[in-house]
Image (spheres, helix red, strand yellow):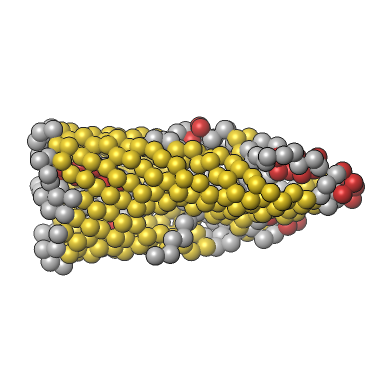
Amino acid sequence: VLFAAGSAYASGYRIPEQSINSTARSGAYVAHTPGADAAYYNPANMSWLEDRGYLEADLTSLNLTSISYRDNRSPLYNGDSDSEIFLLPTFFAVSPDYNNLRVGLSLTLPAGLSKEWSQPYPKTFAEEFTLKVYEFGASAAYKVNDFVSIAAGLRGIYSDATVKSNGVISSSNGGVTASRHMDGDTTGFGYNLAATVRPVDNMNLSVTYRSEVDLDLDGDAGLWTSASFAGPTTYNGSGAVTIPLPAILAIAGSYTFYDQLTVELEYDRTYWSDYEQLDFNYPASLLNPFLIAAFDTAKSKNWEDTNSWRIGAEYDMKNSFVLMAGFAIDENPIPDSTLGFDLPDSDAKLYSVGFRYQANNKLEVGLAYLYDDKETRSVSNSLVSGVFTDAAAHLLTVGLTYKL
């Protein structure tokens, strides 16, 4: 299977929607998780699934619209990012019950970033910024009694990244240009915890926590500047940078009315404040002060923790169809002072719909659509002085579940 990670369309570069149910319910999918994707979203809920094995495979098409930037200083600084389409496949599995113990597996793409600009000013800073993150998770749930289930799991992370930039970095000496091309990858590990309490049969109260994982990316760097008067103009060697895959706390509750309509409310907090700076490191000095200023000086990020509020609903029509819908409000973590072309993020509202169809006793198929509407954002800092508009994303998820 060919994996292609998408750009951030939720808070920061996090991608919450990883399955049919999650896409259809705008990520409000922690307390009521009736499918194999419980192995990822809330492994404690595996205890409440029917006593049989579950397999689920999903494929999401993610279409990112072109972001328009209009500068307040000069039209020469204007630009439009590339419009992009990515495919995100995911997989989930849940074992049958073994003396109140169940095991789950998941393969997901929980984060990603891709922004490309071709106009002279934006590409000086972000000709390409791409981050791909793949996660393999293994978890176990224990049913304490008919009212309480707890779970824990391990997360294995693989990530790779590409950074390119090319443009004028200084007006001295008639204009100094510089370019870079860096690639790197890394592996890391984390954990997740979950618990669900069922005070009554038709209510779930849940909490989940995913640990932070530092992505220590190591790879190759090719740097160049036209400032030959200031020292060596090229560097070709190793380079490294660390960025966080942040911790996430989710608290949710669901209630089922008349055995047909289930409504879920969810609050989650993403701990982006760990992302304080973007600092590329090299084993030796770059020697040229223009290369150092452009590519070796740490760039402040100072991201802030964000909150998301989500509501999701599903209605069992009792005729093999289950209808779903959702709405969410996502905060963005980037302060005006550090927002740039690598990720011109803004607050967003999410709208989604979907359905599942029970083809027979073992096979279920589904389809879901989500629209992510980003707000227009006006920013003025040392790098950007203008307005970003037209940012949005369209997600279409198809998938199937097979019950053993």
Residue drawn at x 39%, y 49% is 135
Q: Residue at x 41, y 40 (%)?
A: 189
Residue 322 sits in quarter: bottom left
Quadrant for the N terminus, please: bottom left
Question: Between residues 366 and 109, which one lies in front from this camera angle?
Answer: 109
Residue 378 location, x and y as percent? 61, 44
The x, y position of residue 90, in whole percent, is 34, 57
The C terminus - image quarter? bottom left
Location of residue 341 with respect to 200 vertically, above or below: below
- The mark total stands at 0
**In the image shown, does 313 or 146 lie closer to the viewer?**
146
User: In the rendered image, is residue 131 in sight?
Assistant: no
Q: Position of residue 197 (x, y in %)?
A: 17, 33
Judged left or right of residue 17, residue 164 is: right
Residue 136 higher or lower than 141, as above or below:
below
* Residue 151 seen anywhere in this rendered image of the structure: yes
Q: Quadrant of residue 361?
A: bottom left
> In screen coordinates, is 164 left or right of 98?
right
Q: Quadrant of residue 362?
A: bottom left
Give the percent coordinates (x, y) of residue 185: 53, 49
Which residue is depicted at the point 61% across and 39% down? Answer: 278
**Residue 207 relative to residue 176: left or right:** left
Judge left or right: residue 296 versus residue 359.
Answer: right
Give the residue displayed 69% in from the left and 49% down from the top.
237
